[in-house]
Amino acid sequence: MTATKVMTHPSETPAPTGTMKALVYGGPGKKTLEDRPRPTLLKPTDAVVKVAKTTICGTDLHILKGDVPSCEPGRILGHEGVGVVESVGTAVTEFNPGDRVLISCITSCAKCAACKKGMYSHCSDGGWILGHLIDGTQAEYVRIPHADTSLHPIPPGSDEEALVMLSDILPTGYECGVLNGKVEPGATVAIVGAGPVGLAALLTAQFYSPAQIIVIDVDDNRLATAKRLGATVVVNNVDGKAAESVMQITGGRGVDTAIEAVGVPATFGVCEAIVAAGGTLANIGVHGKKVDLHLERLWSHNIALTTRLVDTVTTPLLLRTVEAKKIDPKLLITHHFRHADTLEAYDTFGRAAATKALKVIVDI
């Protein structure tokens, strides 16, 4: 955006009033689609966005399971989406009402010590707050704090459905899995979990031309999708013997990068079992239960273990990559729903093995 852009004072662009439909968390196992007040500007750095398309994340399912107790009942869920700016605060300089925008799952003030280190996820006045600590995007309107640094302009002619994948899963797979996992040309990579985030890691790992990408899951449909998206080998772990298979595939050496993309003890254990000496175990999954770290075996193994909450620092890079058609995140979309059918969308997404769902798009 240019510095000469003429801004409109929020008094000239009043925030919406009245009510809206929203997907509301009611406590573990409880969710409802109900009427809620439309958000208004609370700070000069805020924007209110009319949501056009949103989606459901595995993290939303973790919230519904009670794995994220910091998300309190009454919260509107959702942290992904695209939309149109409805109103802006007086301090917003990069966006005007009517601008089409990509909503980042991470809110960044760009000024605190964490943000200056590129750790937007640990922003002292932001981080992962949408659909977690403040109301999120599974609604007709959403308030975005620090709008200048938490929204991205959508290039004209872009496929907005594809860009929904850039709110969270694509930067998550790339930053937490591929970059933290130190994927390199010629390396052997294993991705444990072929859900949307694991598949996002698969797509972006190919930027670095690894020699082999092994994808592990218990769902044959997802493994077939992984194969279509570039996996060199797929392993079904329904028998619990994936680690043995990977060690056979790698001649007993293991993998240079093991990416955990599920968030349960069993998949973390697979990663521990297959990471090669000198390799990296990159955790992506949201863990609601403790896992065992087998230092009795790994203490001498020269491995690196990385954890990360996505920072979305790579979103501009990924936007350019998608615009250049180097990757097509729309391949991850399997289902479409109207906003009125959001509960059905949750049911479909939550029963992915039966419904063959990856990412669902909810049109608001």
Image: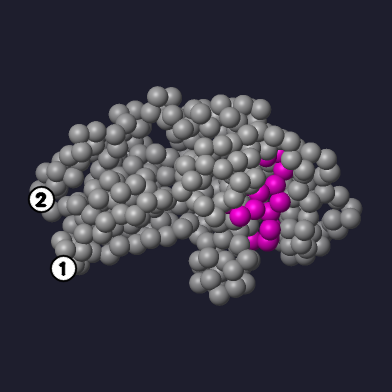
Residue 342 in the image: state x and y as whole percent. 60, 31
Secondary structure of the magenta portion, mostly? loop
Q: Which residue is mark 1?
A: 300
Place of residue 324 in the rendered image (x, y in percent of width and height, measured from the top left): 50, 45
Instruction: Judge left or right: residue 141 versus residue 252.
Output: right
The image quadrant that residue 94 belongs to is bottom right
Q: Amino acid at mark 1?
A: Ser
Tell me whether circle 1 and circle 2 mark residues in contact (CB < 8 Å): no
- Please indicate whether residue 174 sits to the left or right of residue 233 in the image: right
- Seen from this angle, which residue lies furthest top? 354
Residue, disc 2:
252
Vertical relation: 27 (above or below) 341: below
Secondary structure of the residue carrying numbered label 2: loop
Q: Quadrant of the N terminus?
A: bottom right
Where does residue 316 sit, x and y in percent of width and height?
A: 55, 55
Write down the region rendered in magenta: 132-149
